[in-house]
Image: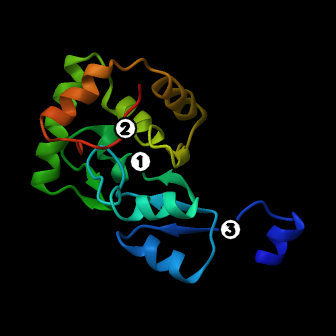
């Protein structure tokens, strides 16, 4: 892969990660250009912010965000049968999602719009993969991506302890 990158046949080498703590382990072994991170950096979870993303910043490694809807709950909301981390959402996640959604409603912001825009505020995030099956879902995702979100929503999420105080947020 390094030879292909060096000749320009490919532009970068990456790895998919869906477990906290794996990024530093990979970077100790392989010179990578990016990670596809599924989960662990979204409105419900910023567990990789301090160690994993800090290590990426040091190494100049970019991120593509996958599973930005946390397996569904940040798109559907805290409904019966909502999924989080590829399984039915546990009560604590349903409650946290309810609280986040309530703040979003107060600021006339769809939960899914906040979920899409949040990870892109981190300087390492180059792209997100929201997922879509039908063309109308692609259109909806584009609308959500461009939905105006007041800065006060992010401040309120942090003030309520629903978002890491030092997490980068959209301007």
Q: Position of residue 28 (x, y in %)?
A: 51, 80
The mark closer to the camera, 1 or 3, is 3
Whether residue 81 sits left or right of residue 109 in the image: it is left
Residue 52 in the image: above or below residue 143: below
What separation in Å lies between label 2 and label 1 (alpha carbons)?
A: 6 Å
Note whether 57 is above or below 31 in the view shown.
above
Image coordinates for residue 122, horizontal then vertical, percent: 45, 43
**Tag nearer the camera, 2 or 3:** 3
Which residue lies under the disc numbered 1?
Answer: 68
Residue shown at the point (53%, 45%) measured from the top left: 128
The secondary structure type at the circle numbered 1 is loop
Q: Counting residues from the N terminus, which is met first, the one under dot 1 or under dot 3? A: 3
SS state under label 2: helix
* Residue 87: image location, x then y, percent: 27, 62
Residue drawn at the location 11% of the way across and 44% of the way down: 95
Out of 83 and 34, give the one closest to the viewer: 34
The dot on residue 115 is: 2
Q: Does 132 appear above or below 101?
A: below
């Amino acid at each position: 892969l390094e030879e292909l990158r060096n000749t320009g046949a490919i532009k970068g080498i990456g790895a998919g990660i869906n477990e906290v703590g794996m990024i530093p382990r990979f970077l100790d072994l392989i010179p990578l250009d990016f990670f596809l991170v599924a989960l662990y950096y979204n409105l419900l979870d910023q567990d990789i912010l301090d160690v994993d993303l800090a290590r990426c910043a040091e190494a100049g490694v970019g991120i593509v965000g996958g599973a930005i809807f946390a397996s569904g709950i940040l798109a559907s909301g805290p409904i019966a049968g909502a999924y989080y981390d590829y399984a039915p959402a546990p009560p604590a996640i349903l409650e946290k999602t309810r609280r986040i959604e309530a703040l979003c409603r107060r600021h006339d912001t769809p939960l899914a719009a906040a979920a899409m825009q949040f990870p892109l505020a981190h300087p390492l995030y180059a792209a997100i993969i929201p997922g879509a099956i039908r063309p109308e879902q692609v259109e909806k995702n584009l609308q959500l991506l461009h939905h105006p979100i007041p800065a006060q929503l992010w401040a309120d999420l942090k003030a309520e302890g629903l978002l890491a105080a030092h997490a980068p947020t959209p301007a």
